Image (cartoon, coloured by chain):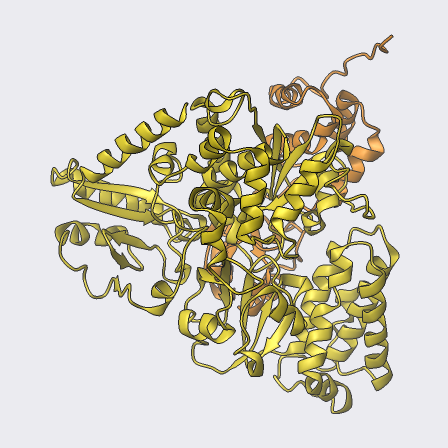
Chain colours: A orange, B yellow
Amino acid sequence: MPLDFAKPTPPSEDKRWKVVQATMRRNGNHHDALIETLHTVQESFGYLDDDALRYVAAALRVPLSRAYGVATFYHFFRLKPAGKHTCVVCTGTACYIKGANQILDSIQQAYGVKPGETTADGQVSVLTARCLGACGLAAAVVYDGEVAGKQGAAETLNRLQKWVEQ
Amino acid sequence: MTFEELIQLAAEEREKQAAFQHTIRVCVAAGCLSTGSDKVVEALQKEVAARGLKTTCQVKGVGCLGLCSVGPLITVDDAYCRNVTPEDAAEIVDRLGDRPAERLHIASEMPFFARQQKIVLENSGVIDPERLEEYVAADGYHGLLHALTEISPAEVIAEVTKSGLRGRGGGGYPTGLKWSTVAKADGGGQKYIICNADEGDPGAFMDRSVLESDPHRVLEGMAIAGYAVGADRGYIYVRAEYPLAIKRLRAAIRQAERAGLLGNGIAGTTFNFSVTVRLGAGAFVCGEETALIASIEGKRGQPRPRPPYPAESGLYGQPTLINNVETFANVPPILRKGGAWFASIGTERSKGTKVFALAGDVQNTGLVEVPMGLTLRDVIFDIGGGVPGGGFKAVQTGGPSGGCIPAEYLDYPVDYESLLKLGSFMGSGGMIVIADTACMVALARYFMEFCMSESCGKCIPCRVGTAQMYGLLTRITQGQATAADLQLLEEISDMVRNTSLCGLGQGAPNPVLSTLRYFRNEYEAHISQHTCPAGKCKMGADLAQEVA
């Protein structure tokens, strides 16, 4: 006889949970859909908080430890909200050769943030990526989802300056 | 769609294309898009419309044209143009039928274009990746329907075996052999096909380009594989970092399903095949096949010991065929033109072509497809145009598990065996050129940092060994190491290589070992003279913070 599980309710009334539920339903609410569902949560809310992880784990009937394990294992998932703007510096080999480290150093000098951190005013998050596949245009930096090629420290600081001044 | 209907569709589309006197193709793959090629398409379309040429000249977005370094790239009929801006649109349309302006024109006789031989990329930069009809007009899905309606699964495998195709993901395992193992496996019915598009090697972007430029080709290859081994479900595991590839792949799957080229009862036969896209989430180790399977199952991507190999017990414990994007992309032409044709290209043991992503300190960065057996010198200097304004030091192949090959071996042919002999390996096809201004110890440290942070932590040699090696390399680049440290580094390299669970750990020492083999003097200069010959390392600088 199948066990009767209560269907968990989403953490809030937020409409975006409907999108998350749709992803789970599309995958038959099967525990395999954990990564797919977390992708949807992050797309909808920007990051994964404790409530979201608890809810997804309960809805897909996986232990919370596994949901947390997956969320922390993969670099793509964020457990903290990002800043208003994000600047992703590619640190793949081609970009390394073309000076990605100098870009990161200059950002750290100018704003005091290391990769993975957000400026104190919450304006800019600085992240790194393991190769964006834009190696032909190294060094590559993604400003708010838009890939820019052939970047150097000066170009990057210029862009960040504009964001901060806003 | 039956075979006759497919041929009919191809003929109609070819007729439609032939009606245009001129075709302007604009690269809208990720590289050129980031330089604004979408605006170029708009501007060209506007100019064409303004002159009332819409019926005689078509402007379309196409996949990668290869020479990423001078994007946005376009072709006007057969002529290549570089660095095109929206402001150039009027002039380009004015000069239709004539030679393009000199400042834009790139001679197609230049070795970068002339020396390539395209099989995997035959449609890249030619067809619109978002239209099924154009792929069909380029003989797309003909291989699949030929297989389904005219030959048996065993004959498909025989053809692939005859072609001599080997896995393009790096290992070079014979594809025909892998297929026949899965075909023979008894899984109580259910088998799976997985396409590995988790192109994690930094410096490699071949798979991204294939998926963005010609997604149907990969789907067709997977379906043919499904028919050959008796699988009816396929998964494509794509990196989440490739949003455009994911979008085009999903669109292609929908189109193929609607046309009855994927789904149930393909081409009126009893063969069913469905494809699902699964997104990676930024873990390099997921390129390893057992880790990839765990990730598709929604778990942490940690590898497990083999055997059993996925061919016997893979996804959900069922027999599973895993091939790389480029391997699948080679399959449709093999079915269309025959295994013997494919086997006539390349060297004795490495057949066909290989796509390389040329990057780093090289004039012509971008994507090239060359027959196996060309020398490294041909690829880097003739096709790649050499190092701009400097001397060549080494070329790095195979990503973080590969090695650095110095100048004296430039005349070695590029094939699986030769690269292995040089202490590197083919890998997925990243080829990063390093100028003589680089410090090889710092480069080895860079790769070790990568492997250390990408280690999944399951087995101790990899988890602890890479951290120890990174620490030693850091000491060397700070000028604080002793000769004993170098010896220890070599001992740990040997241990990590021989005792790690999966390819990530087994390959992690390769950058160290290959740089030690060819550039030992640089290590020794750091240690005994406390100087960096390239002047890149800050001696005594407090890099130790980064370790913590």
Query: In this view of the protein, can residue B27 be seen by the observer?
Result: yes
| Horizontal and vertical percent position of residue A37 | 67, 29
In which quadrant of the rendered view does residue A100 lie?
A: bottom right
Q: Is residue B115 above or below residue B521?
A: above
| Horizontal and vertical percent position of residue B98 | 13, 57
Foreground of the two, B226 or B341: B341
Q: In this view, does A35 lie above or below A84?
A: above
In which quadrant of the rendered view does residue A21 lie?
A: top right
| Direction from residue B86 to residue B453 in the image, left or right | right
Foreground of the two, B43 or B401: B401
Residue at the top extreme of this rendering: A1
Which quadrant does the C terminus of chain B fall into? bottom right
> At x 50% / y 65%, what residue is drawn?
B359
Q: Is residue B256 above or below residue B505?
A: above
Residue at the bottom extreme of this rendering: B529
Which quadrant does the N terminus of chain B fall into? top left
| Direction from residue A55 to residue B13 in the image, left or right | left
| Direction from residue B42 to residue B487 in the image, left or right | right
| Horizontal and vertical percent position of residue B171 | 66, 57
